[in-house]
């Protein structure tokens, strides 16, 4: 590896090692036109940081499910690939998971010890359909530790497991409408104008969208709190009337 005024230069083996791919894969990308030819110095081909960035871009697109022929079209349409790179930055900012990572695994016997006879096949099937759990052989995998803890608290307080799980349908429908409204708001007033600006707009959008995650959560939390205040007041008023 050498240093030049324009940055680092790599021999083919060095570039492949830096990108984490076999040399034969690098050669294949080059044969397909996905990677520009290196600068020649005698019989030695020297690759630049731009080649390394292109290989990392190809790897990122492959991770997102793109096929090589699709990547070839994208790179051809995007010239040097900068627009595609900025689009990936926007994808990471907007498309990253909003749920907290983590799973809880337990056996059916362990689940029965906690929930008892309330954990019927019907309730388990409904939880699977909602996406709360999946069944892997003799194990039950809950996809959200926070949601599992909340369900346990509800059941301990006296809410039947079937009712706690069934409430998930109403919550999913309600928050889907909330998410739809927020996404449309951002798309109309940020995404569409930003896309019209080209690459510069994509850079700005990636930063803006990433910063809106806590804003969306704060808005949803505040509106839920206000709705709960109103509902609880109404229920307390009803209880007072019944006790008179």
Image: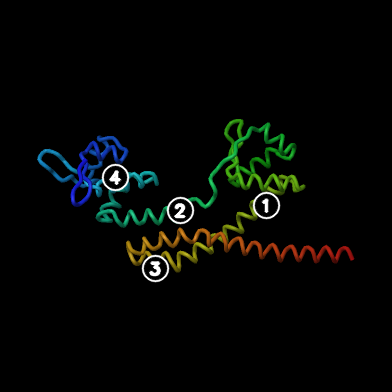
Q: Residue at label 1?
A: 167
Q: Nearer the viewer, mark 1 or mark 2?
A: 2
Residue 130 placement (x, y as % from top left) = 60, 47
Look at the picture and state if 113 lies above or below 67. Answer: above
Q: Residue at label 3?
A: 193
Quadrant of the snapshot with the C terminus: bottom right
In 3D space, how far apart are the residues under numbered discs 1 and 2 (Cα atoms)? 27 Å
In 3D space, how far apart are the residues under numbered discs 3 and 2 (Cα atoms)? 19 Å
- Residue at 62% x, 47% y is 146
Relative placement, left or right, of 140 versus 80 is right
Q: Tell me, yes or no, whether the two marked residues, 3 and 1, touch with CB atoms within 8 Å.
A: no
- Residue at 61% x, 60% y is 221
Residue 195 placement (x, y as % from top left) = 37, 64
- Which tag, 3 or 4, sits closer to the chain's start? 4
In 3D space, how far apart are the residues under numbered discs 4 and 1 (Cα atoms)? 47 Å
Q: Nearer the viewer, mark 3 or mark 4?
A: 4
Look at the picture and state if 238 lies above or below 122. Answer: below
**Nearer to the camera, 2 or 133:** 2
SS for tag 4?
A: helix
- Residue at 18% x, 51% y is 5
In 3D space, how far apart are the residues under numbered discs 4 and 2 (Cα atoms)? 22 Å
Q: Residue at label 4?
A: 55
SS for tag 1?
A: helix
Task: Say which mark, if any, is on residue 95.
Answer: 2
SS for tag 3?
A: helix
Badge 3: how crowded within 10 Å, few (<14), some, or many (20+)? few
Task: Say which mark, if any, is on residue 231.
Answer: none
SS for tag 2?
A: helix
């Amino acid at each position: 590896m050498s240093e030049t005024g324009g940055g680092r230069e790599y021999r083919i083996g060095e570039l492949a090692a830096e990108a984490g791919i076999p040399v034969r894969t690098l050669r294949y990308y080059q044969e397909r036109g996905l990677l520009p030819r290196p600068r020649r110095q005698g019989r030695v081909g020297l690759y630049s940081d731009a080649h390394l960035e292109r290989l990392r871009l190809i790897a990122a697109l492959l991770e997102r499910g793109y096929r090589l022929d699709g990547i070839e079209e994208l790179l051809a349409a995007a010239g040097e690939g900068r627009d595609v790179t900025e689009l990936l930055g926007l994808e990471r900012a907007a498309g990253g998971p909003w749920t907290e990572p983590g799973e809880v695994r337990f056996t059916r016997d362990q689940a029965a010890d906690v929930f008892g006879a309330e954990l019927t096949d019907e309730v388990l099937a409904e939880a699977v359909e909602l996406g709360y759990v999946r069944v892997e052989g003799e194990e039950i995998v809950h996809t959200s530790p926070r949601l599992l803890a909340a369900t346990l608290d509800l059941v301990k307080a006296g809410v039947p497991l079937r009712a706690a799980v069934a409430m998930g349908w109403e919550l999913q429908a309600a928050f889907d409408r909330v998410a739809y409204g927020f996404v449309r708001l951002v798309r109309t007033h940020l995404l569409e104008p930003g896309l019209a600006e080209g690459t510069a707009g994509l850079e700005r959008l990636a930063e803006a969208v990433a910063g809106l995650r806590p804003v969306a959560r704060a808005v949803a939390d505040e509106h839920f709190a206000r709705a709960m205040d109103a509902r609880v007041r109404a229920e307390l008023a009803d209880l007072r009337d019944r006790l008179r």
